[in-house]
Amino acid sequence: MLRSFVLRSLKTPSSACPALRTIVGAMQTAVCPAMSAVCTVNTTFCTSPSAVVATHTPVSAIRTKVSAGSTAVAAMGTAVAALLTKVRASATAFIRSHATVHSFLSIHLNPFIMSVIKCLLTFKKLPIADRPIFATGVKDGVYGNPTVFVAPPIPQADFELFITEYTEKRSLYERGGEAQKPAWEAANANLIKALVTTAEYVNTLVYGNENIVILAGYRPSKSNSSNVPKPTKLKGVTLKRDEENSGKLIAECKAQAGVNAYVALLTEGAPLPPEIVISETGQLVIKETGEPIKLAAPDAAGAIKGIFDFNQLRRKEFVGLTPLSTYYVVFFGINAGGVGSLSDAASVVCL
């Protein structure tokens, strides 16, 4: 009867708490022998007292059996108490684990359920010349923010080597012909693999926040908000000479959270005139002021007077420029919310 009561009291699906089956089995092992002993004593002394007399069972033997039965009953009570303690502990652990899992899902997985944001792998389709530029942006974003990207999967020195080898092998291929192609293809594959591996690492840190993707130098798959504010004025604009290549300048600006594409405007001889602005609707507008717009004076035919770079990267490379001429660059950002205003200009004399 006690066994049936306990089993009925523990009606819990085995799939919910597999440990209960083990506990119940242990209880049966401990309790059933005790119950059998009690039943034997009860049968001997209650239902068949004449058997005792008929067999001349000594009183001392009867006392021994009674004592054994009492001990068995006490052991049964101890086993049941221990079982109840285990059941309570299992139930408490189950409730706590359920709460922990629910908390984890709410904190870490809800952003993915609401909007799956990750690094796009569209860099695989970038023009050949833009791939090392993109990789440099990822290098600056990931290794330049160690408090966010604590443990990148590729050491910085190795990542930089992939970029250098890509550039060098490509240059050799362009100058040396087909014999250099396998080496460049290998360098290209290594660089793409490094970018993919790093993107997968960044994805583990996103938790629905596209700004992490952007900070790392990648493009996010989509925004987690339908009300994205347009970019503000970009900061940290620089324009530097390439000391090893005449007629080449490198421009860059600081990353801004939420910006999906960076546009640069380069002019020669004078900064972009104030008559050229970006309107509230995101249009590049040339205003009428009554005065002619003053840019650089005409010079040799074919000389570059200005470049609009609409590639999404923050790092821009301008080539074919006129040595000893002064160039000016401004940036603006674009995202789903609109177009930002023009930055302050940076300038440098080209070599």
Image (spheres, rainbow, N blue to C red):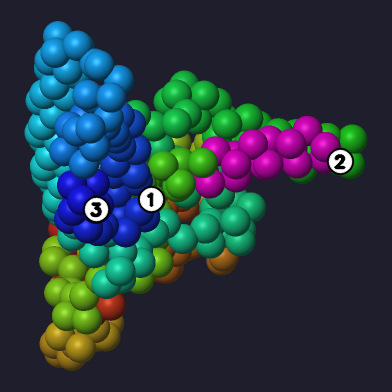
Furthest residue in direction right, as rendered:
179
Dot 3: within a 10 Å radius of its alpha carbon, few (fewer than 14), some, or many (20 or more) residues? few
* Residue type at numbered disc 1: Asn
- The CA distance from mark 2 to mark 3 is 87 Å
Q: Looking at the picture, tell me which residue is in the foreground, 321 or 140.
A: 140
Quadrant (top left, top right, bottom left, bottom right) of the C terminus: top left
On screen, residue 303 versus residue 252, left or right, reads right
* Residue type at numbered disc 3: Ser
Q: Based on the picture, tell me whether residue 185 belongs to the magenta stretch.
A: yes
Q: Nearer the viewer, mark 1 or mark 3?
A: 3
User: To which quarter of the image does residue 349 belong?
Assistant: top left
Q: Looking at the picture, tell me which residue is in the foreground, 93 or 28.
A: 28
Q: Which mark is residue 177?
A: 2
For the magenta stretch, what is the residue range? 181-196
User: To which quarter of the image does residue 30 belong?
Assistant: top left
On screen, residue 127 versus residue 235, left or right, reads right
Q: Which mark is residue 203?
A: 1
* Residue type at numbered disc 2: Gly
Q: Which residue is mark 3?
A: 4
